[in-house]
């Protein structure tokens, strides 16, 4: 197995969330659908991103196993789930995952800025991984 995917297979997974993740992929909100276009099919730096990935008891918007990177789009619903989001963030960080948040508004109004920022952050993670492996 490719080294970069070993930890991917070790991530906790709740199979009870499989149908919910599938439904979220189908329904998808506008910001997620917009950001998915440049991420799918390894379009961004040749990196493999997964949409609505189950990690433990949570479903993250996007996950890149090679970089152990979670990308989240935060909309208005997050304003009312502060404690839940904090628990979720701590849990994901406990798995040594890097989490990047973008606002729903930024994705809709400044996609090029979001993509530029994401490329920059991914390149830094790639460089760090290459240097220390």
Image: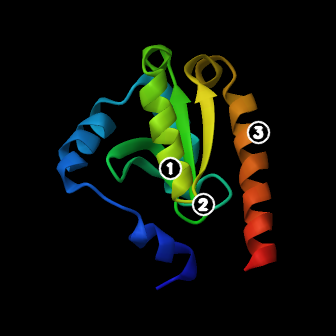
Local secondary structure at mark 3: helix
Q: Mark 2, residues whose alpha carbon is within 10 Å: few (<14), some, or many (≥20)?
A: some
Disc 3 from disc 2: Cα separation:
15 Å
- Label 3 crowd bin: few (<14), some (14–19), many (20+), radius 10 Å: few
Can residue 61 be spotted in the picture? yes
Image x and y of residue 35, in percent? 55, 35
Please say if 128 is above or below 122: below
Residue at image x 53%, y 30%?
73
Label 2: which secondary element: loop
Q: Are marks 1 and 3 in contact (CB under 8 Å)?
A: no
Quarter occupied by the C terminus:
bottom right
Position above or below: 4 against 126:
below
Please tell me whether mark 2 or mark 1 is closer to you in this view: 1
According to the picture, the residue beneath numbered tag 1 turns out to be 92
According to the picture, the residue beneath numbered tag 3 turns out to be 116
Q: How many marks?
A: 3
Which residue does the image show at 49% across and 71% down from the upper left? 7
Residue nearer the viewer, 59 or 111: 59
Q: Which residue is mark 2?
A: 47
Q: Quadrant of residue 103?
A: top right
Residue count near mark 1 (Cα–Cα under 10 Å), binned few <14, some 14–19, many ≥20: many
Q: Secondary structure at mark 1?
A: helix
């Amino acid at each position: 197995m490719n080294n970069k995917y070993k930890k991917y297979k070790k991530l906790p997974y709740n199979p009870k969330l499989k149908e919910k993740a599938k439904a979220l992929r189908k329904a998808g909100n506008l910001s997620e659908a917009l950001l998915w276009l440049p991420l799918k099919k390894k379009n961004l730096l040749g990196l493999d991103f997964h949409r609505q990935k189950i990690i433990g008891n949570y479903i993250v918007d996007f996950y890149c196993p090679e970089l152990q990177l979670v990308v989240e789009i935060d909309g208005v619903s997050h304003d009312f789930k502060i404690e839940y989001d904090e628990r979720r963030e701590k849990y994901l960080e406990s798995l040594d995952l890097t989490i990047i948040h973008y606002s729903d508004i930024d994705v809709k109004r400044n996609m090029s800025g979001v993509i530029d920022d994401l490329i920059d952050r991914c390149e830094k993670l790639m460089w760090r991984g290459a240097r220390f492996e």
